[in-house]
Image (cartoon, rainbow, N blue to C red):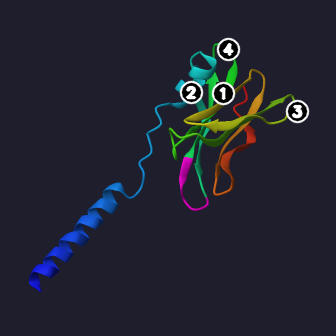
Amino acid sequence: MRTLARRLSTSVLAVAVAVTTFGSPAHAANPYTPAQACNTDFGGSWTQVSDGHRSIIADDGTDLGDVYLMYNNATGYNCVTMIKVRAAGTATNIRASIKMDVEGTTREWVSDSGSYKYYAAIQRYGRGMCAQYAGAALYGGYWQGNGRYTWGNCI
């Protein structure tokens, strides 16, 4: 009886170690920084602006990614990029969006939306304008996102 109990406890321990080690699939770390994502798609040197970051957390607490507003001082362009945390390296639906304002004339949101492995990015000219930005990921059957929906970073 003692041998059976020892074998059973050893088997239970082995299963617990296997589940802990292999139970959830590991996701690749995202190799892109916001500046690298903007540079890869549009070239140039990018700097994160003040109040230019929001985390995207799903309703169930899952960290989906981060959205950033970047600026290229040499060209006057803004870049918004949604950098994935969840499922980095696997193509899933994400979106990066920006809205610009020129002297009170509101423009429409423009977005880069698609099935991407690491990030979505969009750029728009920004000198003499104010910006709003947002990012989102399709998760749990609907879009979950975050951003700044008030005007800011007026250049």
**Disc 4 crowd, CA 10 A, few/some/many (<14, 14-19, 20+):** few
- Which callout, 2 or 4, points at the residue further toward the start of the chain? 2
Dot 1 and dot 2 residues touching (CB under 8 Å): yes
- Which callout, 1 or 2, points at the residue further toward the start of the chain? 2
**For the view shown, which residue lies furthest in the top direction?**
74
Tell me the amino acid under the disc marked 1: Cys
Q: Secondary structure at mark 3?
A: loop
In the image, which disc is placed on residue 104? 3
Q: Position of residue 107 (x, y in %)?
A: 85, 32
Quadrant location of the C terminus in the rendered image: top right
In the image, which disc is placed on residue 75? 4
Q: Position of residue 60 (x, y in %)?
A: 57, 62
Q: Which residues are magenta?
A: 59-64
Q: Position of residue 62 (x, y in %)?
A: 53, 56
Q: Measure the C-alpha gap from mark 3 to mark 1.
A: 21 Å
**Disc 1 crowd, CA 10 A, few/some/many (<14, 14-19, 20+):** many
* 73, above or below 151, in the image: above
**Tag in front: 2 or 4:** 2
In the image, which disc is placed on residue 79? 1
Q: Is residue 90 left or right of residue 72?
A: left
- Which callout, 3 or 1, points at the residue further toward the start of the chain? 1
Tell me the amino acid under the disc marked 2: Ala
Q: Secondary structure at mark 1?
A: strand
**Tag in front: 4 or 3:** 4
**Disc 2 crowd, CA 10 A, few/some/many (<14, 14-19, 20+):** many
Q: Main secondary structure of the magenta part?
A: loop
The residue tagged 2 is: 37
Q: Is residue 14 left or right of residue 59?
A: left
Q: Residue at x 56, y 36 (%)?
A: 117
